[in-house]
Image (cartoon, grey):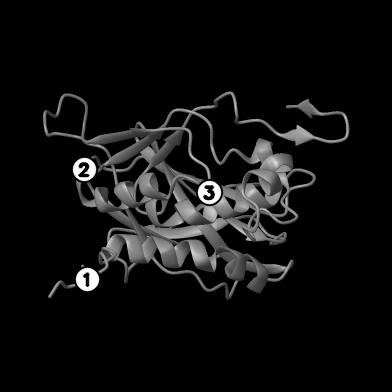
Amino acid sequence: MSLSPSPPRMSLPAMYLLAVWLTISCLLAAVSATDPTPIQQRIALLPNGMTVSWSTLGAIGVTPTVAWGTSPTSLTNTASGTTLNYNPSITWFHHVTIYNLVPSTTYYWKVTSPVGVISPALAFTTAPPVGDRTPYNISINGDMGIFSDNGTLIQMAQQLPNIDLFLHIGDLSYADDYPYFANYFPGDPRAVGATYETITEQWMTSMTPLWNQRPYMVLPGSQTTQHIPPLALHQ
C-alpha cells in the first residue's frame, strides 16, 4: 500500500507575509480619505539619528510630530517634521528626523499628531559608533514588485533577526509597468484597474513589516519612474 505524501507545510514567516499580502487592499480600502491613522511606517538611518516616516490617506492639517524615548512607556521627547504630497498620489507622506541619538541604542517612537491619533509605539536601533568593530549586517536587495517576489519577501522576513539595515539598490515596486499588469497577470485582482499609485501603495504596505523594524535605505533604478499617460512620459 502506498501513501500519498503530505502537502508541504507553510512556514510561520510565509503564513505571516501571505496574510500581509491578502490584507493590503482591505487596509487601504478601510482607511477613509480623511483618516489620519498612520500607515506604512518606516525608518531611515542618519549618521547621528534616524528619520521616521509614515503615510496617511488624507491631509492631517497639522505639523507631523512624534514622541520618542528609550522606553515604550516613557516617550518624553518630541520632534516635528514635514508633509509632502504630489498629484495624483493617494497618500500624504510625513517625515520627522530625530537628531543627536546615542549610537547602538534602542529607541521607541509613536505618531502624536493630530491629537487623538491611534499609533503604536515602534522601535529602532541606532548604528554603532565610527570605529566600532561589532558586526553590522546589511541585506542588499533590488528589483522587487508585488506579483512575483513573494519568495524574496519571505526570505527577508526570515532573516530579519540577523539584519541591521536593508539597502534596496533600485527598482521599487515596478509600478511604472502598471498598464501591462492586466495582461501579464490575468485574473489577479491586484492587476484589475491598476494605476501607478495603487501598485506603489500595495508594495509599500507589503514592505511595512520589514521597514518599520529596520532602517530601509533606497536608491533609484531604471524602473523607479512615474508613467504619465497619455503622453507616455516618465519622470
Q: CA distance from mark 1 to mark 2?
A: 52 Å
Residue 128, numbered label: none
Figure quadrant of the C terminus: top right
Marks 1 and 2, the one that precedes in the sequence:
1
Q: Amino acid at mark 3?
A: Ile
State the SS at label 3: loop
Q: Which residue is mark 2?
A: 104
Q: Which residue is mark 3?
A: 146
Figure quadrant of the N terminus: bottom left
Extreme right residue here?
Answer: 230
At x 44%, y 32%, the residue is 142
Circle count = 3
Of residues 28 and 1, the one nearer the viewer is 1
Q: Is residue 139 left or right of residue 20?
A: left
Of residues 177 and 47, the one nearer the viewer is 177
State the SS at label 2: loop
Which is closer to the viewer, label 3 or label 1? 1
Q: Amino acid at mark 2?
A: Ser
Determine whether 122 is above or below 159 in the image.
Answer: below
At x 81%, y 29%, the residue is 232
Of residues 177 and 51, the one nearer the viewer is 177
User: Which quadrant of the figure has residue 122?
Assistant: bottom left
Which is closer to the viewer, label 2 or label 3? 3
At x 29%, y 64%, the residue is 10
Q: Which residue is mark 1?
A: 4
Q: CA distance from mark 2 to mark 3?
A: 33 Å
Marks 2 and 3, the one that precedes in the sequence:
2
Marks 3 and 1, the one that precedes in the sequence:
1
User: Which quadrant of the figure has residue 202?
Assistant: bottom right
Count residues near mark 3 (Cα–Cα under 10 Å), then give few for <14, some for 14-19, many for 20+.
many
Determine whether 14 is above or below 87 in the image.
Answer: below
Determine whether 19 is above or below 137 in the image.
Answer: below
